Image: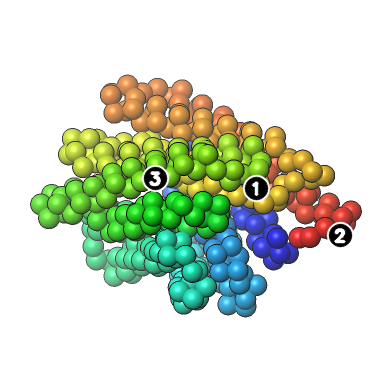
Amino acid sequence: MSNKKKFWIGVSLFNLFIVAFLGFVLRSKILFSLPIINYKNLLSAHSHFAFGGWAALALVTLLVYDLLLVGDKKIYQWALWGIQLTSLGMVVTFPFTGYALLSIIFSTLHIFSLYVFGFAFIRDARKKIPEKSTRLLAISSVISLVISSIGPFGLAFMMATGRGNANFHRDFIYTFLHFQYNGFFILAALSLFINRLLPLRADLTPLIRKLATTLSLSILPTLFLSLLWHNQPVFYVIAIIGCALVVFGLFYFSKLFFETWKTPLFKSGLARSFFILSFLSLALKMLLQIGPIFPYLGNAVYGDRPLIIGFLHLVFLGFLTFYLLSSFIEEGFFTLRGKTIAWPFYLFGLGIVVNEALLMLQGLGILFFYNTSLYNWLLWINSIILFVGSGMIASAALINSKHRATLYPYLPV
């Protein structure tokens, strides 16, 4: 592992710790007064930094180092620094100002940093990623990342001009979330997974090609699942097409998962466990995604905040974070003297699973007209687990890095 790749992974893990800390403060604000904290502003900081400082930074690092194999190239280093510095700018300004001049400047510069990465990556991917399915997923993910900027730019235009209404506000938010979650996060992670899998199982190429094509084609039509409340018949037809593609994608994905089960893809048992949790989360997400096509269920779900948050966390924590951590563990990023530093991951993994269970139970309670404040207390306690677990992971990465640099300078990094 190159020094610069290791550096950026370490930075992204520290950013994950900051994300968990902000989540803990948000959960604390729900239960306690904390008058100095503006919940809405802190939520904006939490979400922007989670997307930029953790997910985007980690994925971009792996895409340029593992797929292109040119991560040290200047344009990608500039893009990575741009992503990190603008993410820090947003996490510092949003809690105090909300959507104001400085925070908007940092968020705009963040998008431009992603544009620089996107342009360079698509140009290089066409030449440097020979395998078609991997290339399709990787380029589709980056195109989705670029398209997602329609959301924040649309919201900024509404705020600057005073035009638009609550309906457009909702459309822009769901457009951003859709292309980030269902496009960039999922397709990028799958491209990295397939890049790791195919050298071991070239016989799976036809199945992977079907999966890659189906998921890439599903991105645009499934957007309309979030727009069905407009009550336009054509939206419903397009959403049905998207659901059909998701069903086919789930079928191909399930076959691939069971085939992968037989493949010695991971030497580390911990990495394999996180990988299994990641892919089970994605399968569940794909199954739940088609639910809103049924009008009664769709109306109920989109009015149920805990279910929405649970669904988003299912992708962000359950799929993406589990997969990224499994990759870092397998690459030996947390291996010290031949052993993996495992306890931080057990704690953090437990926090992710409990978080999903509590959010889904709270959401179902609201759906069936039964709810209790006990869930807020349990989620607060669990946010402490996530905060401590992420801090231990970041500390383990720092300790391991210093240990290798000082005691074992001859080891390859």
Residues under labels 3 and 1: Cα distance? Answer: 22 Å
Which amino acid type is marked by label 1?
Glu
Q: Say which mark, if any, is on residue 409.
A: 2
Could you say whether the residue bearing mark 3 is in a helix, strand or loop? helix
Badge 1 element: helix
Q: Which residue is mark 3?
A: 253
Question: Crowdedness of circle 2 by 10 Å Cα count: few (<14), some, many (20+)?
Answer: few
Residue 314 pos. (x, y %): 44, 41
Pick the residue in front: 386 or 314. 314
* Residue located farthest toward the right when viewing the structure as drawn: 407
Q: Please tell me which residue lies in front, 281 or 307.
A: 281
Which mark is drawn over residue 330?
1
Residue 274 quadrant: top right
Q: Residue at x 45, y 29 (%)?
A: 357
In the rendered image, the residue lying farthest to the front is 203
Q: CA distance from mark 3 to mark 2?
A: 42 Å
**Amino acid marked by disc 3:** Phe
Residue 376: where, in percent of width, then height?
A: 47, 29
x and y percentages locating residue 196 in the rendered image: 55, 54
Q: 316 or 334: which is nearer to us?
A: 334
Which quarter of the image is occupied by the C terminus? bottom right
Picture coordinates of residue 363 (x, y %)? 36, 31
Marks 2 and 1 sit apart, C-alpha to C-alpha, by: 21 Å
Name the amino acid, label 2. Pro
> Mark 3 or mark 2: which comes first in sequence?
3
User: Is the residue under label 2 in contact with that under label 3 (CB below 8 Å)?
Assistant: no
Q: Residues within 10 Å of mark 3 (few under 14, many from 20)?
A: many
The quarter holding residue 100 reads bottom left
Which mark is nearer the camera, 2 or 1?
1
